[in-house]
Amino acid sequence: MVSKFSLFMATAQYNFLRFIPGKKQQFFEYLEELSENVQTDFFCQDILEVWLENFGIGGLVLGSAALFSIGFILMIAADIIIWRTGSTVVTSLVRICSGLYCFEKFRGSSKRGIQDFLILLYIGTCLLSGFHWAVTILFLIVFINGAAYAARGGRLC
């Protein structure tokens, strides 16, 4: 049985190592030990489903903290840069990078095309309206957690 701490550390490291193909495969094998339902092409929602399956709601919260805390800090920094800078070029670049980060972080598999479309639509709306990125990522975290909870048979309403 895998402990919460070791899964937390592996999930937190996944944030940085997911772009290295060998490390992503290694994390997949780690997740596969915990659940047979993990797809080879997994995303944040799939990881949260494994957390929920093995550790319940508390695990879902821990998994979210491991997956999204760095991104939340980055979005707070982006909001501060946007607020403090007077340059429209810098502001535009930070907003575009923030939007791309959010979409890359929260996108799902090809089976979740409608979910990806909704996420893209929301991020595009936030990008065009100048919405705060810290609030945007919080909404996306709640959205993905709700989707993971519903996928594992939980009722949202």
Image: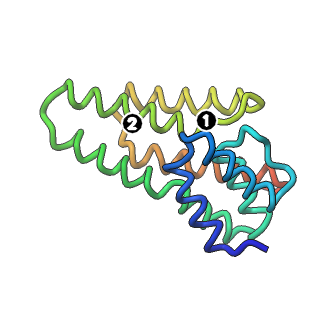
Q: Which residue is identified by label 1?
A: 107
Would residue 114 be visible to someone looking at this image? yes
Taking depth in this image into account, of 9 and 46 the one nearest to the observer is 9
Q: Residue 62 falls in which quadrant of the image? A: bottom right
Task: Give x and y (percent) for residue 115.
Answer: 68, 33
Q: CA distance from mark 1 to mark 2?
A: 14 Å
Quarter of the image for the C terminus: give it.
Answer: bottom right
Dot 2 falls on a residue whose secondary structure is helix
Residue found at the far left of this picture = 86
Mark 2, residue position: 98
Residue density around tag 2, few if under 14, some if 14–19, many if 20 or more, within 10 Å: many
Instruction: Indicate which disc residue 64 carries.
Output: none
Give residue 140's position: percent from left, percent from top: 55, 45
Left or right: 68 as drawn, with respect to 97: right
Amino acid type, callout 2: Ser
- Which percent across, then down, holds residue 24? 63, 45
Q: Please tell me which residue is depicted at 66% across the width and 73% down the height of the picture.
A: 4
Q: Sequence-wise, which precedes: disc 1 or disc 2? A: 2
Tell whether 92 sits left or right of 138.
left
